[in-house]
Image (cartoon, grey):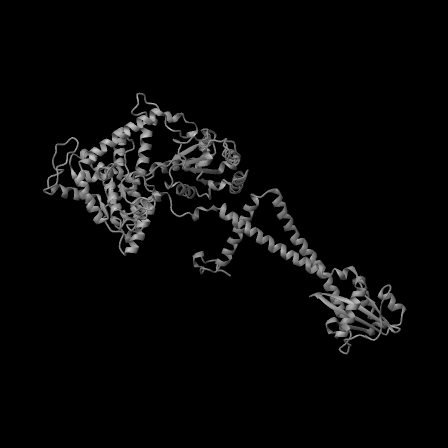
Amino acid sequence: MTDPTKSPADIPPGDDAPAASLLAWFKASIARVRDWLSVQSLGMRLTVLAVVLMIPASALYAWSTLQRQEKLSLEVKAMAAGQGSEAAWAYNTTLPVVFGSGSVLSFLEAHPVARITIIYRPILWTVSERFVLVESEGRQYAYYPSDMETKILADKAVTAPWGGKLTFVPQAALDDASKDMLERLEQRFGDARPQAEQGAWKGGASALVSATLTLGLIAFLWYQTGGQRKALKFISPAQISGDLSDLVGMDDIKAEVAQIRDQYERRLEYAAYGVNKPFNVMFSGPAGTGKTKLASYLAKELNLPILFHSAANLETGYVAGGSNTLSRILALAKRRKRCIVFLDEAQDLFMKRGGNRKYDDDTQNMLLAILDGVRTKTDAEIIWIVASNFNSANLQMDEAMLRRFQMKVDFRMPNQQERLAITGHYLRQRANKVLPDMDLRHFVELTEGCSPADLETMVNQAGIIAVQAGQMIGAHTLMQAAERVLVGNVNDNTTKERERDRRIIAVHEWGHFLMDFQHQHKLAGGNWDTLLANMTTIKISLKANPRNNALGFVLHKQDNNLLQTKGDMEHEVRVLLGGMANEELFFGEDGTTGGAHNDITRVTRLLHHAVAEMGMYRKTRLNYAALVKDGGSAPPDEETRSIMEAQSERLYSETKATLAQYTALTEHLTVCLMRAGEMTLSEALGEIRRFESLPAAPALTLPGMSPSRLMPA
């Protein structure tokens, strides 16, 4: 016994651990079975109930049958035991055998008996079969006594005159001739066997059926609950790692969650003010901004189990498939009464109903019914969080669905300070493998528009690069990782031995760069430090990028301006057109390549946005694209095309004229880039200043400046 004075800490670990773990496993198994039954139809439940009832019924039948047969077998064994050791293990095979009429007891009372031979054969471990041969007046009479006759025969053998003439012969002890004779007797008289003897196998068969049903039911429920556990599994708060403090730089969003927590914990006080709607919360925002993490941390804060399910799995492709899944989720949630259900990737559920796919409307209607404002008290304990990447600015949402949510939390991409804090948070988790006092300014600028998940991926990639190089994680490692994530795998083998292609690519990429350089140089007033800080270019490379089939690329920072002016858009168009314009300057119009395909596509979209949607370059500011129904698109009208073409030609001419001033500089930079393979912004600006310091370098005229050197040597 355990000493009652000992505290639990004094008990050696593991003494009660097996019993506790077994009990926990048993409870979890019962809970999974109950979960599975709660989502099944009435027919399936009745079927399982019928099988459960059949198991003890068949077992009871087998037990009672075997008990009767065991009792009968014991009586036969008792008769055999009274023969003594001198009993003969054979019967008289010389006499003819005939089937006896009437009962064997009547025959024994009415006829002289020379010998009674009982041949028995064990059927099961407690059951035997009997065949009686009575030798009388030169013949042997065959009988198959019933269970009752055997009992009476055993009782009367004690005092009857024929009691000493009994001989018991096991069938296995017979010689071959006797066995052949017995087989012929079986064929001739087998139908005369009593029903009780013919059904002697039923007890064993019933026991086998009971065992089979038991094992089959266990296997069926294990398979069914195992599949459901993977698809619809509630996670307990203890299984969630991390907490709200791990979400760095999301103070405004965490404040919204704090309101949800406060309202849930003090719902009675809120109800006194008439705030008693169900807890339906909508998370919306770009992917990777922490919607799933925030939902899990909220569950941990409220100490509630949470179910994660992708709404994409509700699109089964057949009628009522998604609605049935929602019904099962609701049944599981009701069983727990207080829990959180998190539906992720649910943007399709917010689309307007009335589409061509009937099963989509079925799923949406079912979700509307679940999220309805009229519920029982049990339903009101369930928090439904529906997350999506839905962009309400571009697509219309179903108004009935929107009304179901009492709270909407809009997630956003982190700003520069938040990106710095998030990156620092992930680096602190690897503190012993990170160089101290890292300058993350360029990394943070490069990752403009990246989500927290992207930043985590970059830090992980930096760790991989550091391990492979056998070094610590530094600023250079982070920049390499960012390039790997943003650009993808690059290689210089594609154009390594193709000097002509490499030259065209270099001229093309310098066209983009120099148009941005000219604009930023003007804004910086000739200050090279300001120019280095403000230019968006990070790197110019001749390495091929399989991700977008580019033979070279310019890695640049994202523009952090939230509002884009008309001048900003025109500058972006000039930068995009710079590649083709530079090709034409160096190789002629016939020498331009298809490398500008992506640039031209982006220019077309920018000008269409400016002319058709913003009304720029028109007499009136109208958005004709808004007249297209259902958010679709239509070819631009003749006037829009005419304005777009005119502005494109104007901007292209301006771009070409600007780059014409840089032909000598472009040639110098092209040679440097072909030699190095890739150049950073600081290296490019250094080459420009070195070029200007050469005695034979031509003076460059920049808009708003007199012809002079870019900077003094």
Q: Which residue lies furthest to the top in this view?
A: 619
Q: In this view, does 489 lie above or below 560?
A: below
Does the rendering let one see residue 567? Answer: no
As rendered, which of 631 and 417 lies closer to the eye?
631
Residue drawn at the location 25% of the way across and 29% of the way down:
650
Q: In this view, does 362 lie to the left or right of 520?
A: right
- Judging depth in this view, the residue of 251 and 616 nearest the camera is 616
Residue nearer the viewer, 589 or 513: 589
Q: In this view, does 80 lie to the left or right of 535?
A: right
Q: Which residue lies furthest to the right in this view?
A: 110
Q: Outermost residue, left direction?
A: 695
In this view, 429 is above or below 370: below
x, y percent for residue 468 = 30, 55
- Residue 324 horizontal/vertical position (percent): 54, 40
Q: Where is residue 144 in the image (x, y as percent from the top left)?
A: 80, 65
- Quarter of the image where the C terminus is located: top left
Seen in the image, is 380 located left or right of residue 460? right
User: Which is more toward the observer, 660 or 693?
Assistant: 660
**Looking at the picture, does residue 526 appear above or below residue 458?**
above
Quadrant in the rendering for residue 62: bottom right
Q: In this view, does 413 lie to the left or right of 474?
A: right
Return the x and y of residue 244 as percentages of the image width and height.
Answer: 37, 43
